[in-house]
Image: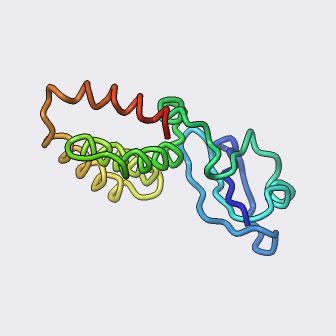
């Protein structure tokens, strides 16, 4: 079974029907209403209506900055995790902080307390890093994201 994220307008009223041929993983809200499902994407669209667009998980654009600017934090989180796995030292800590920021943004609309805790952890990690290296981490991350 394939996993998809369908992007609907934020104000879309969606009715989820249990026996529709798909399994609902999550619904996230930011710029879009992101419906994360496993199953036949056509059945999902027959049930919920046509989205603005959709992606198959693992095939999203690899432009980290585009995803972040478009509030697609779950996809950005996935790219950052692949970079984090192969990074070391302070670069790894910086990437981990960005992963936590993405997670905080995902959680913000559902549970601000959890979001605040994740953001505090991210800022704590960043505060441990040498300030003169932060711009270099930013540039390095941009280059590494293109190779993911």
Q: Residue furthest bottom?
A: 19
Residue 19 percent coordinates (x, y)? 80, 75
Q: Is residue 60 above or below residue 137?
A: below
Image quadrant assignment for residue 91: top left
**Which residue does the image show at 34% across and 59% down from the upper left?**
114
In the visual, does 129 lie left or right of 135?
Answer: left
Q: How is the image coloured?
A: rainbow
Residue 38 percent coordinates (x, y)? 69, 64
For the image, the number of numbered tags is: 0
Q: Quadrant of the N terminus?
A: bottom right
Residue 99 percent coordinates (x, y)? 37, 48
Q: Nearer the viewer, residue 109 or 21?
A: 21
**Which residue does the image show at 30% across and 54% down from the upper left?**
118
Q: Is residue 52 above or below residue 104?
A: above
In the visual, does 121 lie left or right of 55?
Answer: left
Q: Is residue 50 above or below residue 111?
A: above
Q: Nearer the viewer, residue 10 or 93?
A: 93
Q: Nearer the viewer, residue 86 or 124?
A: 86
Image quadrant assignment for residue 43: bottom right
Q: Nearer the viewer, residue 128 or 58?
A: 58
**Which residue does the image show at 37% across and 33% down from the upper left?**
141
Residue 27 percent coordinates (x, y)? 60, 57
**Which residue does the image show at 18% across and 47% down from the upper left?**
124
In the visual, does 71 lie left or right of 94?
Answer: right
């Amino acid at each position: 079974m394939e996993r998809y994220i369908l992007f609907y307008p934020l104000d879309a009223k969606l009715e989820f029907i249990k026996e529709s041929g798909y399994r609902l993983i999550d619904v996230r809200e930011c710029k879009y209403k992101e419906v994360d499902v496993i199953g036949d994407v056509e059945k999902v669209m027959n049930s919920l209506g046509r989205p603005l667009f959709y992606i198959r998980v693992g095939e999203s654009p690899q432009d980290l900055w585009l995803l972040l600017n478009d509030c697609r934090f779950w996809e950005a989180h996935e790219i950052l995790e692949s970079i984090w796995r192969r990074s070391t030292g302070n670069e790894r800590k910086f990437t981990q902080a960005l992963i936590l920021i993405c997670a905080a943004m995902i959680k913000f609309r559902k549970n601000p307390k959890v979001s605040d805790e994740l953001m505090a952890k991210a800022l704590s990690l960043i505060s441990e890093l040498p300030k003169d290296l932060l711009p270099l981490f930013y540039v390095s991350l941009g280059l590494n994201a293109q190779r993911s």
